[in-house]
Image: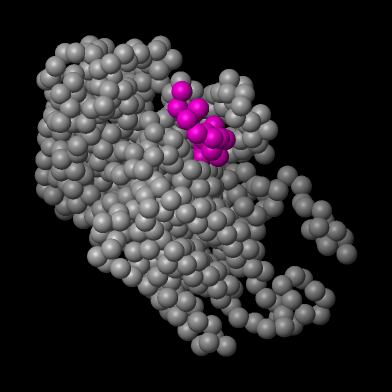
Amino acid sequence: MEWLLASAIGVITACGVYLVLRARTFSVVLGLSLLGYAANLFIFAMGRLVSAAPPVITAGAAAYADPLPQALVLTAIVIGFGMTGFVVELALRASRETGSDHVDGNPGRDEKEGT
Amino acid sequence: MNHLVVMPILLPALAAGLLLAVGDRRLTATRIVSLAATLLTAVCAAMLMAQAATGMHQVYLLGDWPAPFGIVLVLDRLSALLLLLTGIVAVAACTYAACGWDSRGGHFHVLFQFQLMGLNGAFLTGDLFNLFVFFEVLLIASYCLLLHGLGLPRLRAAMHYVLLNLTGSAVFLIAVSLLYGVTGTLNMAHLAERLTQLPPVDVPLAHAAGLILLGIFGLKAALLPLHFWLPAAYSSASAPVAVLFAIMTKVGVYAIVRVSTLVFGADGGIAHFAPWLLPVALTTLAVAALGALAAERLSACAAYLTVGSVGTMLAAFATGGAEALAAALFYLVHSTFGAAALFLLAELAGRRRGAAGDAIGSGDVTVNCALLGVTFLLVAASVAGLPPTSGFLGKLMILQAVRETPAAAWIWLVILAAGLITLLACVRAGISLFWDGKQERAGNVAEPSSAEWTPLVLLVACSMLLMVAAAPVKRHIDATAAQITDRADYIAAVLGASPERAPRALRERGGQ
């Protein structure tokens, strides 16, 4: 399970970094979301991986899951969701005003680069 | 517990809620509420400053949970100093915004108060994840504030600013959780204790997390490879927002100082970061000085000078030692007032030149206002570090403090050369805006009203006060630096703070 989770985080981060480095706002927003997911999974993994263990104090429990990373992930998800909503709106506004979805809002250079 | 400690966070939050309820239509009412809340927060900060001057750490347990389990707010001399600085700059920015800028877009004052809440929270919190949360609060407010007034340059600058900071937030989370993974705690005092007891196999991980954090705080503070967003963002922001943003890079500086001295302070504090921080800070200063000289507008020049001031103070801080840290903190206070005043001047002068704005060189219309010119002279002399201004005193303290360190020659060379280049940049801007050119009035521009003068006078007066009262301020800041470098007190205060009464759940459990 450790191997699977670690490589999943790695692959998602790699995809996120690749997309963030693209020139179009749409890919960049997708990349940011992927980076956010990777960070959330990473926080979750930092509480160590256990299965079928309760996160709250229960009588007779042999092992516990760390509840703190779960709370942190929740906070991070909420913040990430709000930020993604904002950046989507900003990207839409920028593409409407500049007539281009390039992150620099520069249509001239846009056509040469393509995606 | 002293509930005053939480007030700088609560007051703006409550004011923001109230402002949302009042709504944008009743502009006068929103202005009164926002100004009153900002003033009240500044007064709170001043009272906290007086309390912190006793040298005690005040620990505020949120929800009355004992320290490593609950979230703590910690007030020490450094937090109090930055709270007061934020308070003064916020009063200036809010007053100026109330002169008209706040009606050019929706919800200015609401966002302003949230930004204030985020700033104050970041200075007060004693918990690393909570620091992330307050960073996000101040960032999302700053995204909207930066866009205030809209227009193409703002949209373009905001796009870069938002995307960069969102990436930064993801990386911040990774660093924080990495630290949690190796230590099992996020309370900064507890982290400091745990990091000294790490098994050797985990030490590289903790160091990696520390360096990632340095990168993130460097992004907020606009250190060299990560500074490209700042000139465009700050120079395109509306004037009151730019004034408030003068304190934003200082949040990054504060976080670097706090985390490196408190959390990673075991091996001589800064020792772990220094090999990276010093060269980066010096290059930042050099590049920023050249940028200021090449700037096409006064606001861009002020933005580059903001970057340069961060370079100066971090170069001093990176040499380690309480004396250099004190000098850096003095420079922090001075440069915040200087940068904020320059942004205001750029707006006030630019408005009087009509279409030319605050452009340097190309505009041929001179600002026909002697008072504005003299104010610019005062501020520019202070920013460039001419005697006897506070900028001169700050630089002198830094040069004196670092003279024994191995890198002294480099620091002296870069700071002095950058000072000269800054002086040239200010002279160039001053000649272009106030001296050389046609003496005609650009259209029918209204004279700055007395309300518009108030924030500028406030900032310049604070700068002058820093010069006249340099000795007592320096004594206070020396005590601040001594308190930061001795982290044992902080750790003992936070981990030793006991709740006023045990939470009910614990009491019941104890009874069972």
Q: Magenta stretch? A: B100-116
Say if A34 sits above or below B369 in the image.
Answer: below
Dominant SS type (magenta): helix
Q: Is residue B210 magenta?
A: no
* Position in image of residue A40 (x %, y %): 55, 69
Q: Is residue B102 magenta?
A: yes
Say if B322 sits above or below A68 in the image.
Answer: above
The residue nearer to you, when weighing B485 against A45, is A45
The residue nearer to you, when weighing B307 against B156, is B156
Q: Residue at x 37, y 50 (%)?
A: A98
Q: Residue at x 15, y 23 (%)?
A: B364
Q: Is residue A91 visible?
A: yes
The residue nearer to you, when weighing A8 against B435, is B435
* Position in image of residue B7 (x %, y %): 61, 35
Say if B8 sits above or below B487 in the image.
Answer: above
Q: Quadrant of residue B16?
A: top right
The residue nearer to you, when weighing A17 against B328, is A17
